[in-house]
Image (spheres, rainbow, N blue to C red):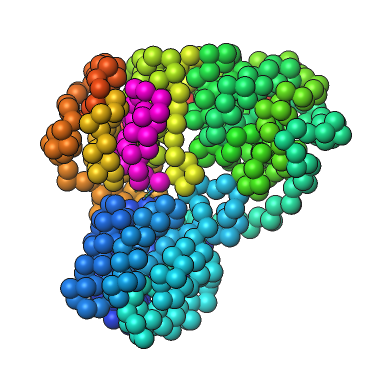
Amino acid sequence: MSTPGDVTQRWAGALMDGLAGAGLRRVVLSPGSRSTPLTLAALRHPDLTPRVVIDERSAAFHALGLAKAEGRPAAVIATSGSAVANWFPAVVEADMGRVPLILLSADRPPELQDCGANQTMDQIGLFGPHVRAFHPLPPAEADIGWLAPLAARVMAATLQPMPGPVHVNVPLREPLVPTAGTGSAVSGPVPPQRLSARARPSSETLETLERVIGGGRGAIVCGTEDLGADGRAAVLLLAERLRVPVFADGLSGLRFDARAGAAVLAHPDEVARGAPPADWVLRLGGAPVSKALSTWLQTARGRPQVVVCASPRVADPEGTATHVLHADPAEVCRDLKGSPAPECWLRDVVAMDGVAANAAEAICAEDAPFEGNVLRRLVRGLPSGTPLVLGNSLPVRACDWLAGRVPGGPRPFGNRGVSGIDGTLSTAFGIVSALGPGVVVAGDLTFLHDLGGLALGRDLPLAILLLDNGGGGIFDHLPQAGLPEFEQGWLTPPALDAITAARAFGLSAETVATTDEAVAAVRAALDRPAASVIRLPIDRAESLRRFRSFFATRPAPIRPPGSP
Ligand code: TPP
């Protein structure tokens, strides 16, 4: 029996087969998760010559060069989000230079569009008039017969009547690797009720809200957006009034707020893995990074979940919101009354958080460096309020999982709009240019992706902590790690001497051996007028072992209500 993963893989395979049948030979691919079925199909096709280029901007220019030199179309494959946007300069060059290119962009399926899902943006017609044709494919289906004729039309349109780029957008559903397991059919979410559209909610709206979320074992979930000092204060006071825990993302700023007490969970991801579904949830500040938290929200499907956001863009990738309130989250938190939860609820959740905190401390106390102990010690070692930019991939997750709660800690930042690994150094330079000395923590691919950004470093006080784990360490945590093509297609260890590269830009650069040395070097770098690169080598296998052993800690489950 074929699994959903098989159907998706056959779909991607048929598309690639059709393109190869129509004469495609060269495919340039950049690593990513959503694009996995396309990447696998390209790597496994006997007639295609794949080449991996990490930076999508370079990847598209590389394909452009191939197509120019060979006089035949070349294809590029990338994951969804800003990865695809990075093709733009090469696409306009191919348009105006009349070079045949096939742009195969992975995308999220329709149910994950326009709801704050990670790495998702509107990719429909992204390249506008710069492509000869645009084909939005549906999500994979069993009928693949029409893909070969479509592929032939795509190839033809890159050449006739005028050579140029053609864009094929490919929405892909999980599972992204052909695996066992049939998946289960879930019914679609019920559309949420819309409550109001004003910055300050009316008293009727508040009364409705208080009926929806009053009493019971509730929770406040705060995503990656920082609500600002006033907003954070309002959240903390509301949590105190209602006696509920706050599951705050590492980027929300709440865990590093000087006023944060025990109700602001130090390890919300870990607690979400073991806590029973909440009776109600108030969701603020966008979607959190944590997958476990997202799964936990899904276990509470059908119970009241209120999303409060000022903008028309509602972050509800789980599709579990029962109510949406368009209003300023700070105002809502300030005005909302509601009855408190039973006392044992907060006590039990905080106890669970305490177990996770002890486990985090133990895992991070071991000296061998890994992303987890780096983030844990770094947030404790920086002067209060220091801008801390967390690169996507493991840095932002290690902070969420293991940094804990540090009142008076740094001020976190991250690019979670489309969660790209592009432009991270340049973004951090912008932040320190506005706020003064700061730190960016980046993986080696992220560093390489924005190498040109180092040119900004001559007069900006940025400590660049490069966690050099030999490629995309995040992929070790995903099922792709089991594939024979893993190193070639996902891990993609870069051949870069980062120290020499940094010095080529006139920056000071050093390699350190331990986590404590890294934190000390970062602190020293904050006093310099220019940027510094601090490279910390990390053993991937050791890192995976430490993360896994942390996740294996299971605090005692919380008793269901009514039990003694
Ligand atoms: N291209 C862009 C522009 N953004 C992305 N998010 C991706 C591709 C897909 N992607 C997500 S994480 C990742 C990739 C390629 C690997 C990042 O590796 P590295 O920076 O070394 O960090 P690590 O995984 O080791 O923490």
> Which one is nearer the viewer's eye here, 275 or 403?
403
Residue at the far bottom in the pictured view: 161
Residue at 48% in and 81% down: 146
- Above or below, 558 against 132 in this view is above
Residue range of the region highlighted in magenta in the rendering? 420-448
**Residue 401 x/y as whole percent:** 46, 29
Dividing the picture into quarters, in which one does residue 246 lie? Answer: top right
Q: Is residue 204 magenta?
A: no
Q: Looking at the image, can residue 10 be seen?
A: no
Q: In the rendered picture of this protein, how many numbered marks are placed on residues?
A: 0
Q: Residue at x 34, y 75 (%)?
A: 164
Q: Position of residue 244 (x, y in %)?
A: 69, 22
Q: Quadrant of residue 45?
A: bottom left
Q: In this view of the protein, which residue sits in the foreground, 406 or 296?
A: 406
**Was residue 436 drawn as part of the magenta stretch in this picture?**
yes
In front: 156, or 33?
A: 156
Position of residue 87 in the picture relative to residue 129 (left or right)? left
Residue 358 horizontal/vertical position (percent): 46, 16
The quarter of the image that holds ligand 1 is top left
Q: Position of residue 56 (x, y in %)?
A: 32, 55
In the figure, residue 222 lies in which quadrant?
top right
Instruction: Specify whether residue 158 is in view.
Output: yes
Is 170 rendered above or below residue 320?
Answer: below
In percent of the image, x 74 and y 20: which residue is there?
242
514 left or right of 407 in image: left
Q: Residue at x 50, y 19 (%)?
A: 256
Q: Quadrant of the C terminus?
A: top right
In the image, 37: left or right of 3? left
